Image: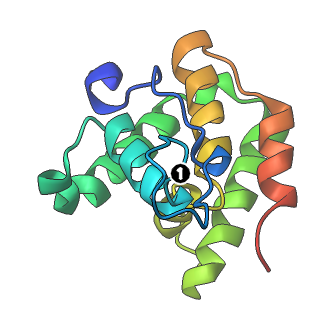
């Protein structure tokens, strides 16, 4: 699997910086709903267009397989924490299936941190403890 054709680490994921203003006449590029920018950035990271949206889940499944294939980069503690995060996130689907957890990692609340985690993993072959801890601490209960 060519990870770079699957996932574009060069995308700047900053959707939370956008705010919709009350000014309906504004043409400001930052004057866009954050959830619209989130969807655009999510599709762009997976090299998808809006017409390809149905294949997003398949791409997320491939990303899960890629992360699992890189398990040798994790320390035991990091791997345990990563799996704990996935199980906690899967709980939002009332499940413990880690493949549901990876889907949640790409949801609005966590995608920015997930992207940083993946960028470090893909580009630098490192597991960033700080990002894992932020993900764990920000999981909605």
Front position in the image: 73 or 126: 126
In terms of depth relative to the viewer, which is nearer, 72 or 140?
A: 140
Residue nearest the observer in this picture, 106 or 89? 106
Question: x and y percent of residue 110 in the render?
Answer: 65, 55
Disc 1 designates what residue?
31
Q: Residue furthest top?
A: 124
Question: What residue do we see at 15% from left, 52% from top?
Answer: 52
Q: Is residue 107 visible?
A: no
Quadrant location of the N terminus? Answer: top left
* The image quarter in which residue 7 lies: top left
Q: Residue at x 50, y 40 (%)?
A: 68
Horizontally, residue 132 falls left or right of residue 31, namely right
Taking the spot 56% from the left edge, 62% from the top edge, the residue there is: 23
Q: Secondary structure at mark 1?
A: loop
Rendering colour mode: rainbow
Residue 50 in percent (x, y) is at 20, 54
In the picture as drawn, the residue positioned furthest to the front comes out as 25
The vertical placement of 120 against 46, above or below, is: above
Position of residue 126 measured from the top left corner of the image (x, y, whole percent):
68, 18
Horizontal side of 49 relative to 36 (left or right) equals left
Please give left or right for residue 74 compared with residue 44 in the image: right
Where is 67 relative to 121, above or below? Answer: below
On the image, the x and y values in percent for residue 20 come to 57, 61
- Mark 1 neighbour density, 10 Å: few (under 14) some (14–19) many (20 or more): some
């Amino acid at each position: 699997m060519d990870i770079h054709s699957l996932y574009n680490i060069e995308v700047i994921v900053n959707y939370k910086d956008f705010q919709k203003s009350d000014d309906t006449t504004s043409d400001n590029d930052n004057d866009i709903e954050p959830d619209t920018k989130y969807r655009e950035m999510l599709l762009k990271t997976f090299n998808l267009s809006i017409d390809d949206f149905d294949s997003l889940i398949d791409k997320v499944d491939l990303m899960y397989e890629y992360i699992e294939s890189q398990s040798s980069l994790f320390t035991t503690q990091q791997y345990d924490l990563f799996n704990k995060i996935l199980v906690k996130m899967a709980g939002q689907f009332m499940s413990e299936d880690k493949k549901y957890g990876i889907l949640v990692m790409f949801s609005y609340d966590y995608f920015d941190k997930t992207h940083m985690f993946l960028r470090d993993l893909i580009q630098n072959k490192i597991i960033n403890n700080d990002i894992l801890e932020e993900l764990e601490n920000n999981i909605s209960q």
